[in-house]
Amino acid sequence: MSKLAERIRKAVRLDAQPLGFMAARTAAEPSMLLGGLAKDAKSAADLAKRGADFVVLTKASPGDAKDAGALAGALIEGEADAKAYREGGFDFVVFDPDRTSSTAVLDDGVGYVMLLPKDASDIDLRAIESFQLDAIDVGEIKGSLTVRRQIELRRIYALTRKPLLAAVPADISVPALQALRDTNVVGVMAEGADAVDRLRASIDALPARARRKDEERPTPLVPRAAAVADEGDDDHDHDGLP
């Protein structure tokens, strides 16, 4: 498991509130992660010092991780080999499924974040569920977070069962961040020192996670052909969607 995956698990976990001096330590654990986008290792190291929980180098070579100064990932494409980035010290790689070779993402020792394909259908999203991914990057959240956009984010999560990451503007409000967090967006990302400073303060101001009444209720995914299978010809299989 990558360190990014471990941090995501800690961020989404609902722990009982401890007593005494332990309360302060729990309060310091972020309930939402902050990622910094940087073009080079020097910029990434600066974002880490300003409070980024992880950094993504958008123009990286495998050896840049040692100078990034934080939990680092690299954006790769084409034939770039994820194994080489892991051996160079990167914890995870970010890839575009439309631009990255399938042979470049075979290494099991590194974490993976997939950029969500544009106009992904329900069938595409359900296929993504079978991939070993730390998270899915859903892209930039532009403008206000509408209920319609929340429905779309819930659809992505319900069908992929993967934590979501999103790029947000630096001036996003704390209530808007909370709404994103409640829509299975576990981490937000921004580029530049000022944006990271502002988002760090907003994330630290978020209220603790509250358990929803419907949190344990599974999302029903009923195969459409299931009811027909027992009534049809025994010589044929009628397979619904998984």
Image: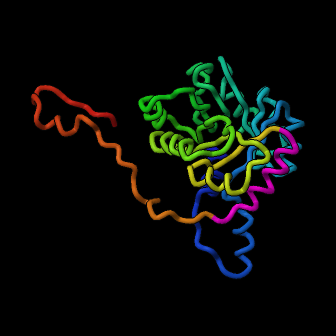
Q: Is residue 9 magenta?
A: no
Which corner quadrant of the image does residue 231 belong to? top left
Q: Residue 1 at what x, y percent from top left?
A: 60, 45
- Magenta range is 192-208
Q: Main secondary structure of the magenta part?
A: helix
Examine the rendered structure and indicate whether residue 85 appears above or below residue 141. Answer: above
Q: Residue at x 59, y 68 (%)?
A: 15
Q: Nearer the viewer, residue 127 or 80?
A: 127
Q: Position of residue 32 (x, y in %)?
A: 67, 54
Residue 171 appearing in the image:
yes
Can residue 112 be seen from the camera position used here?
no
The residue closer to the viewer here, 130 or 119, is 119
At a point 52% along the width and 40% down the height, the residue shown is 152
**Residue 200: in magenta span:** yes
* Location of residue 52 with respect to 94 vertically, above or below: below
Residue sitting nearer the eye, 221 or 97: 221
In the rendered image, residue 215, in percent from the top left (x then y), is placed at 47, 59
Q: Residue at x 72, y 56 (%)?
A: 174
